Amino acid sequence: MLKAADTGGPVRALGAMSGTSLDGVDAAVVVTDGQDILGFGETGYRAYTRQEQAVLMAALGRWDGPQVAAAAQVVEAAHREVLGEFEGVDLVGFHGQTLAHAPRGRGTLQVGDGQVLAGALGVPVVWDFRSADVKLGGEGAPLAPFFHFACARWMGATAPLAFLNLGGVGNLTWVDPRKAAAQEAGALLAFDTGPANAPLNDLLRQRRGIAFDEDGRIAARGRVETGALELFLAEPYFSRMPPKSLDRNDFSEMIELVSELSDADAAATLTAMCAAAVAQGMQHCPAPPGRVLVTGGGRLNPVLMEMLSVSLDCPVAPVEDVGLDGDMLEAQAFAYLAVRVARGLPTSCPTTTGVRALVGGGTVSVPD
């Protein structure tokens, strides 16, 4: 059972994240009491095979049916494999794989059964993090902001800053670390900025059979089609006030906007769309951040990072510059959030998801 549950002492929690880029499962240990980060532990990664990616792709946007069941089996098997390599863990935070996200419609769906994992791993598993938030009127995303607040405190930040996650979808967390707690008024603002790597990855899979634009090499040879970029920025989503969130495929028409372009020009244009969406989103920040720390796969694309540096009015750097791990930050976030759920602490608030009141989402499953 959960170590030090009654005393509020440190817990060695293991988090797992399978993101919208569909590349694989990240796993990471965080030592925390649910408030402060007390240490970071070992990490692991299990890539999805091409066949597994095809199964997951076939289930995207679906709420039920055989494709969803097949995707759940892939997700559970991959997580059992990578999480089973860790020892001495008190608690697991299992995000699952998002297949569909429509908070104003049917809700949100992450496949993978936490009870199955609890039985396989022999430790309590916290899962289904988003449903409670959506039921209370929230977007159910993004959920990492409470962890970002803890990261800002861990790194000793004393002024507002922003964390920018560029996975399949982009999301921004503005943090004021001078506040006493993440749920305090004015401590956080979070929202999805727009599509990030997903459209470009999908385009390159279709055209070249490759997973992503490594080092931005294809985009670096191309030219941005400004007409397509202007059409993209005319989307009503960008004028909506946050909090707000997106499904992975909400901007799938982006590929249509670049369908007549060469591979290089299409890659450059899709990359520019990601950066422009972030620049639009920055206008919603309560105060200008002193810096933007980038996590997720997008930080490894020098073309994208240069576009962000040019379009934003503050320094832009990968989170590694402050001692964090940009490959594992989301997995670490769900380790941290799992402890908060287990201890009855909130995991989202009105300024992170638009939920009507503080909510601690998540189901705790214990081994039989």
Image: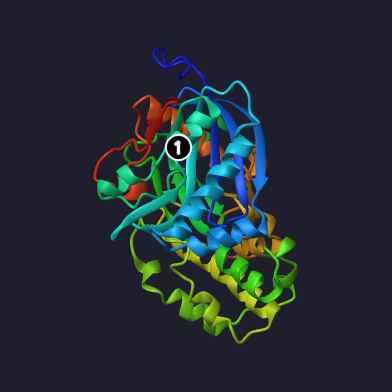
Q: In which quarter of the image is the C terminus?
A: top left
Query: Whole-percent x and y of residue 314?
Result: 57, 54
Give the residue at x 61% y 53%: 315
* Quadrant hosting residue 107: bottom left
* Quadrant hosting residue 338: top left
Q: In this view, does 69 lie above or below 334?
A: below
Query: Whole-percent x and y of residue 198?
Result: 56, 64
Give the residue at x 51% y 59%: 169
Give the residue at x 63% y 24%: 87
Binning the other alpha carbons within 10 Å of mark 1 as few (below 14), some (14 to 19) or many (20 upward) gives many
Q: Nearer the viewer, residue 119 or 247?
A: 119
Q: Nearer the viewer, residue 57 or 157?
A: 57
Residue type, label 1:
Gly
| Residue farthest to the top, as pictured | 7
- From where the camera sits, is residue 100 visible? yes
The residue wearing badge 1 is 114
Q: Is residue 12 above or below residue 293?
A: above
Say which element carries label 1.
helix
